[in-house]
Amino acid sequence: MLNSVVNLHKAVSFFSRHRVVHALLDNDDAGQKALARLGESLPSSEVIDQSVFYRDHKYLNEYLQEKQHQQVQRKQQPHGHKVR
């Protein structure tokens, strides 16, 4: 977990030990630039951009919060039908 694209250079040595790296970066210019740098820095690894799963959100955390809110809303809805 990087927490910031500023820390990308610190993580490259760790990521380089892995054949596949799943990138869950922000959906903004900084995230796309970091993804490109990651790919360039890891020529022996497959870097997979996972931001497509939350493309309607700028941040992964926004997406996760919305999903959690939707689940809570569903649980609060009445289940079944009234029996007369």
Image (cartoon, rainbow, N blue to C red):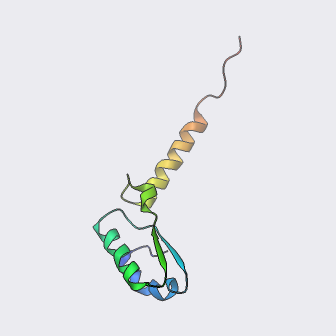
| Above or below: residue 57 compared with residue 22 | above
Residue closest to the far bottom: 13
Residue at 48 percent across and 52 percent down: it is 65
User: Residue 55, percent across and down?
Assistant: 39, 55
User: Residue 81, percent across and down?
Assistant: 66, 20
User: Residue 26, percent across and down?
Assistant: 37, 65
Q: Image check: 82 left or right of 73?
A: right
Front in this rendered view, residue 49 or 84: 49
| Above or below: residue 80 compared with residue 7 | above
User: Residue 44, percent across and down?
Assistant: 48, 85
Q: Image check: 27 left or right of 10?
A: left
Residue closest to the far left: 29
Count up the numbered dots. 0
Front in this rendered view, residue 4 or 53: 53
Residue closest to the far top: 84
| Above or below: residue 12 compared with residue 50 | below
Residue at 35 percent across and 69 percent down: it is 31
Residue at 51 percent across and 45 percent down: it is 69
Where residue 63 sits, quadrant-wise, is: bottom left
Considering the image in quadrants, where does the C terminus appear?
A: top right
